[in-house]
Image (cartoon, grey):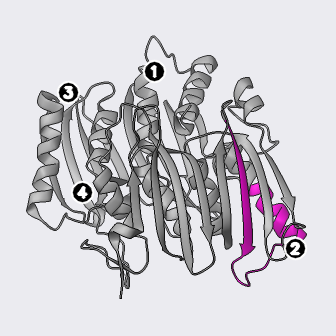
Amino acid sequence: MGIPSDDLVVIQHAKNANEPTIVTVNCPDKAGLGCDLCRIILEFGLRITRADISTDGRWCFIVFWVIPHPASLKIDWENLKTRLLSPCPSCLFSYNFNQRNPSPPPIYLLKVWIIDQKGLLHDINEILCNLQLTIQRVKVMPTPDGRALDLFFITDEMELFHTKERRDDVCQCLSEALGERCISSELQLAGPEYGHLQGFSSLPPAYSEELFGPELVDKVSLHPLSQDMTTLKTPTVTVDNSLSSVHTLLQIQCVDQKSLCYDLMRISKDSDIKVAYGRFNSSAKGFQNIDLFVQQKEDGQKIIDPERLKTLCTCLKEKMLHPLRVIIVNRGPDIELLVANPVELSGKGRPRVFYDVTLALKALGVFIFSAEVVRHSTQERQWEVYRFLLDESRDFPLNSSKARSQIVDKVRRTLMGW
């Protein structure tokens, strides 16, 4: 017997634009549930300003305080509620998720012929995000006559692509929003071409270390953080094993960023660490104070092993300081912006990275000649890599170190919601 879905997820809408909306999830617990919920909230363009997490191993109670980011973003709250129900165990609701035998949704290929313009790639991305479509891979191929063929390998979070109505609606929305800039669009089930975007060509060792190295804390970077970011983003992690007989307390202070809750919950999920109780609080000065009471998932006990604690704290600091890796490199005659983030052990990439990077480049007036998203595997983990070939312009002469630093800094700030 399941639990009525109306009791599992409750959304209390903000009374005015300056207040957060409160999202409450009350359901049976499962491993990684907090991470899955944070991911969905991020996919809708929401920023978690505060969170309370409580679980006893059988039942989970989580409250999120969220705001649209940017504030002008329109949120489909009913769709959000439906999506938040999807990872909750033992619920009764009419939706197309199979929780007993979960399988990844099929990959579809969206082909869009466009008249190429600066910022248009972001505009298309924004439309797809609003339609609850997740971009798995991208290939942008410009032509000499000023047009471009954009290939988007996407999944439908509503899982309705099997209906002709849903597929037609996507193409119609693109046509109406882009107007004369859209020559044509076509949506179909992806074929073997999807597999051709799985690999990543080799990089010089210095570039590979910066993108895929185990940690960047205290290392010399090709593009160091700007002074204000370095000062603000110095995180602290304090471990206390004296307050509880079965929990380790992690007290964290760091600068606030929109994906912080997701990053910390993802680390705990992938490290087999269970968060029994957690509280995320934003201060008026833009910092987050976080208390996490955690246990080892395998035995439900506190973390005593010094090496495991050291590894966990290092990983937490790394994610707070460098949630993503961003560099600009010379690739023969081309100049390429590379953004890399580790993939969850479940195989899922990070939400809205492509959206944020294209938004940053559009704001700077930097033209994207071509772009693609690929996967790259190292000995330690799998990475998702976003590749953007950039075009020269008067405002941003890309051979200038100052211009490159400005681009990297803008992309980093946008990804962190600054």
Mark toward the start of the polypeptide (3 vs 4): 4
Query: Front-most of 299 and 25?
Result: 25
Estimate how packed mark 2 is, as few (under 14), some (14 to 19) or many (20 or more) residues with alpha carbons within 10 Å. Answer: few
Q: CA distance from mark 4 to mark 1?
A: 29 Å
Instruction: Tell us which disc is closer to us: 3 or 4.
Output: 4
- Kind of residue sitting beneath label 1: Leu
Mark toward the start of the polypeptide (2 vs 1): 2
Instruction: Tell us which disc is closer to us: 1 or 3.
Output: 1
Residue at 44% over, 53% down: 41
Res. 236 mark: none
- Residue 314 as seen in the image, left or right of residue 257: right
Mark toward the start of the polypeptide (1 vs 3): 3
Q: What residue is disc 3 on?
A: 145
Instruction: Tell us which disc is closer to us: 2 or 1.
Output: 2
- Residue 177 as seen in the image, left or right of residue 325: left
- Kind of residue sitting beneath label 4: Leu
Residue at 46% over, 31% down: 18
Q: CA distance from mark 1 to mark 3?
A: 25 Å
Query: Front-most of 252 and 375?
Result: 252
Q: Secondary structure at mark 3?
A: loop
Residue 379 in sight here: no
